[in-house]
Image: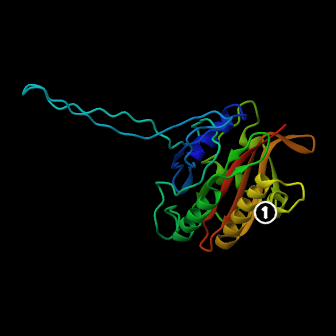
Amino acid sequence: MALLALLAACSADPGSTDSNSDTATMSPGTTATSTATSTATSTATSTATSTATSTATGTSTDASTSDQASTDASSSAPTSTTTSEPISSSSGSTGADTEVGTTGPDGVLGPLALDAMDALEAAVAGVTYPSESDYPWVVVGFADAAPVSEVNLKDVIAGVYVPHPGQAALVDRTIEPRTLAQLIDPLTTPQDWRDDYYKMVGAQYTKIREVLEAELVDIQVFRIGEQQGNVLQGAVDIYVLGATPDGDVVGMWTVSVET
């Protein structure tokens, strides 16, 4: 659901967040999934709850009436064109299209990628990225996509990308490469002024870094946004991606609002 929620961040006003959970499946070999932490109430953020339920009711009142079944479902598995409200916290989970197996031309994520996604989803549970609107992280996986670079990044993420209304399309957006240290060090480096909340955030991102470095190689950070002068502004997509030894790509994605 974090994806569902986060996808909404890309098509709705970026000032709202919500809380939900589910699994999102993208194009074959590509998954983006999330599970929100359970909360009794939502904070100063908008709530978008999407649950997938299927109910069938059969009613027979006499011999001449046959059973009738009805299904009422609202799906929380978004595609690249589905949008929803952002949520306040999330973790990722393996998409329904993936299964244990070796990577190859069939575009199925291998067991190493699935293990990495499981570990990363646990690490990002309840974690948001601090910006003008704090959005959750969504775990993503791309079969046989390594290596990822500025050259092929847009093609790799096309299956999970959602355009931002009023901003340039993906093909016209600027990519800023960053290192993992540039992304995480500002959140984890001890500072005298930091209170308990910032210390908690630091601990969360320390754990995320440990998982990324334990499960993946060639970890890269890409910021994708509309360039204004020398900086990216508006809704900036952040992808943290690394490779498994057998060639899959696993990582996490969020949106940073920068005006």
Residue type, mark 1 in image: Leu
- Indicate the position of residue 2 as horizontal and vertical percent values: 59, 46
- Indicate the position of residue 62 as horizontal and vertical percent values: 9, 26
Q: How is the image coloured?
A: rainbow
Residue positioned 61% across, 69% down in the render: 247
Q: How crowded is the residue under tag 1: few (<14 C-alpha within 10 Å), some, or many (20+)?
A: some
Residue positioned 81% across, 61% down in the render: 188
**252 and 126: which is toward the camera:** 126
**227 and 126: which is toward the camera:** 126
Placement of 208 over or under 80, stated as above or below: below
* Residue at the front extreme, as displayed: 196
Q: In the rendered image, is residue 112 in sight?
A: yes
Identify the residue position indicated by label 1 in the image. Answer: 180
**83 and 211: which is toward the camera:** 211
Placement of 128 over or under 109, stated as above or below: above
Q: Quadrant of residue 30?
A: bottom right
Residue positioned 71% across, 58% down in the render: 240
Q: Quadrant of residue 206?
A: bottom right
- Indicate the position of residue 154 as horizontal and vertical percent values: 70, 50
* Residue at the right extreme, as displayed: 229
- The N terminus sits in image quarter: top right
Which element type, helix, strand or loop, lies under badge 1? helix
Tag count in the figure? 1
- The C terminus sits in image quarter: top right
**168 and 250: which is toward the camera:** 250
- Indicate the position of residue 198 as horizontal and vertical percent values: 79, 54
Q: In the rendered image, is residue 151 in sight?
A: no
In the picture provided, is 75 more to the left or to the right than 129?
left
